Image (spheres, rainbow, N blue to C red):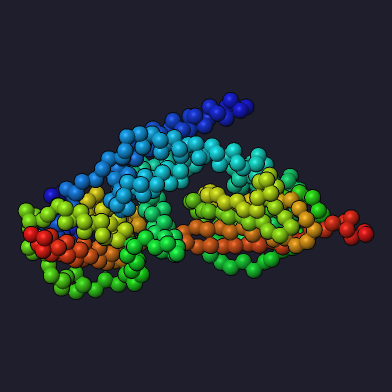
Amino acid sequence: MTGKDPQDPDVADDDYQTLRRALRRMPTPEPRAGFVERALARAAAQQRETQALLPARLRHFLSRWETWAGAALGAAAAAAVAFFLVRPIDTAVNEQPQLALTIHETRNVDVLIDSERELKGATIRIAASGSIALDGFDDAQHADWQTDLDRGSNLLSLPVVARTAGKGQLVAVIEHGGRTRRVAVELTVIDPEASRS
Amino acid sequence: MRRASRTAETSDAVEFERLLRDHVPALYRSAYRWTGTVDRAEDLVQQLLVRLYPRLAELRELDQLRPWALRVMYRIFVDQLRRERSSPVQFGAEPLVDDESHVDDEAWLDPAPGPAELAEQQIVQESLLRAWERLGDEHRAVLSMHDIEDYTLPELAQIMEVPLGTLKSRLHRARARLRELLAAERMIAEDRV
């Protein structure tokens, strides 16, 4: 019999080895006809759909996770209004920054994710609530996707639009390896017309 | 510009297929052994491919793509199990055993009725299949990868991202459970005779 693992504590257990041989004879079906081709094609199609759903501006930022130096330049060029330092993913974040927007104003809110190591396949979830929405998502208030984070600083620039006067909140959640970190930004949307009347 | 983008997408799709095509059947067989049904196996493999596609650049650099893909698939599988267990809809899987970090040497001396009588010629394949179907998903996964697909314990420790001791314990429990189920199946079969 092949595949004897010297570290296997049951390697000398003849009874179990007999059972193991039987396990190896268990019939296992091959994929159904056409499944492999369909599954590969679907994976490619899903990627195209995901890309198409992301508005061009957000996709631009998402496609280039930058280092700190690049991030600073990119943020300046985008007239970013705020940086939020998300500390290494396993430490707490206590900051709760606040921003004020004018109604109907669109602004980039930049979140800086500082990771102490490279993180493959991190999940990022964005939720906008209250008076704001994610610009370019047809008023959607949620978006999530997977990406790899570089060691060091990674910039996420989120286009937010102020829909109604009042309070809003933008939350970014980063998940990786069962760990989760969350950063929230409080936003106040002001309607100048209403203030004058 | 758009044409250039389309060409790049097509080229990525072709390369993705070239890299993965030969591995998909083996990954599917693993998925089938873990999940026990065609539909769930197909879903699992599909999710894996969707997860891998954006990581094409990474895939190109891999020397050993299959164990790496198996590891990603295992992670998806475990995430699914956790979601199912926290869902109000229960799927009848065995609960994960959390406290597996210590392995007592004596634990390897299985006090349960040993299947001495389970000489190969006596094993009814149908009983084994039924026992396998009743085995928990986690147990099926570890037995499938170690006892059928021949991944060594150190390789499995990497794929499953657990310490070696935990893995040995998990493997031992899985085998013990399979033996229990098989003994029960054999009793049922004998009653029928």
Give the quarter of the figure containing the C terminus of chain A.
Answer: bottom right
Q: Is residue A127 left or right of residue A23?
A: right
Relative depth, front residue between B8 and A160? A160
Image quarter of residue B26 = top left
Residue at point 48%, 51% (across, down): A120
Q: Is residue B83 left or right of residue A113?
A: left
Q: Position of residue A68 (x, y in %)?
A: 63, 51
Q: Residue furthest top?
A: B3
Asked if residue A15 can be seen in this view, the reply is no
Residue at point 34%, 40% (across, down): B24
Q: Position of residue B39 (x, y in %)?
A: 35, 47
Q: Position of residue A170 (x, y in %)?
A: 67, 58
Relative depth, front residue between B80 and B56? B80
Relative depth, front residue between B117 and B74? B117
Relative depth, front residue between A197 and B97? A197
Residue at point 13%, 70% (across, down): B113
Q: Is residue B36 left or right of residue A78?
A: left
Residue at point 73%, 46% (across, down): A78
User: How many numbered discs sit on the rendered protein?
Assistant: 0
Image quarter of residue B137 = bottom left
Compared to B65, does A33 lie above or below? above
Q: Residue furthest front?
A: B192
Asked if residue A61 can be seen in this view, the reply is yes
Compared to B185, does B76 lie above or below? above
Q: Position of residue B86 (x, y in %)?
A: 44, 64
